Image: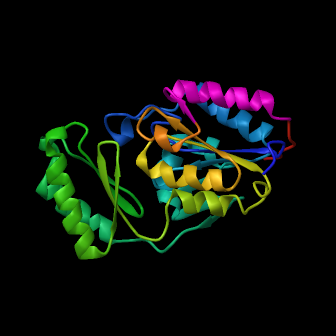
Amino acid sequence: MSAAAPLSLLLDFDGTLVETAPTPDAVEIGADLRALVAEALQRLGGRLAIISGRSLEQLDALWGRTLWPVTVAASHGLELRHDGRLRAPPPARIFARLTRETEARFGARNGVVIELKSYGLGIHYRLAPRLREAVRTWADACAAEHDLVIQEGDMVCELRLPGADKGDAVRTIMQRQPFAGSRPVYIGDDLTDIAAIDAARVLGGQGIAVGPRIAEHADAVLADPQAVHDRIRLLLDEAPAAPFIT
């Protein structure tokens, strides 16, 4: 694809737009980031997407109305909200059960943080790194019993439904208007973002890593979320203004 093609920005959330927090609910979204997202949406004519392992419910709770006009692929792409319409599978009740079982096995006293999502369960051991192998063994057993997928991330094992990853989300989004025919730039920091970076590059775009974890898979590397914000501003300065009506 020609470098003259219009730009689309596809962005991971945790560790990319915001610093990774000790617990998932400790993340805060400042006014500057909200303003940057609104500006990018306007300048790019709507070609802005957030692609996250969090559920759509979690993201909406954090962002509020700021996120409503943005294309969002949540739950690793199982949920897609685009142009005001939501595509998602039926609710998965198994994760509420697994939450109870995981809480009984580890408990908050051990420092394991359990994150229930619409289509997944995150088992975070950032506060208890000594329990990494125990968490992985438990996740392996749960996945085998219930035909789930294990997604490892930064100090977390996530159990999720099979059938989608962030690469699939990138490909799906890039087929929709106003993204179709544009040049995707994907920015992410963790193992789940490798498939999305690969998809963006196959589609004629670029993948940018945040930090060293997946640097070998990317075309460029940024140090931290603040550097991501700075790169977004630079990309917006270079991109021609596009009309967009919310």
Give the mark count: 0
Q: Which residues are magenta?
A: 220-240
Question: Which residue is found at the position 54% from the left and 41% from the top?
Answer: 218
Q: Is residue 135 visible?
A: yes
Of residues 179 and 115, the one drawn nearer to the viewer in this rendering: 179
Q: Is residue 232 magenta?
A: yes
Residue 30, placed above or below residue 148? above
Residue shown at the point (63%, 41%) measured from the top left: 66
Residue 145 or residue 205, whichever sits in front: 205
Give the image location of residue 175, x and y in percent. Answer: 72, 63
Q: Report the colour scheme.
A: rainbow
The secondary structure that most of the magenta stretch takes on is helix
In the drawing, does residue 130 fall left or right of residue 181?
A: left
Q: Position of residue 246 (x, y in %)?
A: 78, 47
| Picture coordinates of residue 122, whole percent (x, y) | 32, 53
Q: Is residue 31 left or right of residue 14?
A: right
Task: Write the residue at 84% across / 42% down.
Answer: 4
Residue 77 shown in magenta: no
Q: Is residue 35 visible?
A: no
Relative image position of residue 240 (x, y in whole percent):
85, 35
Left or right position of 4 against 188 = right
In the rendered view, would you say 227 is above or below 242? above
Q: Is residue 132 above or below residue 234?
A: below
Residue found at x 39% / y 57%: 117
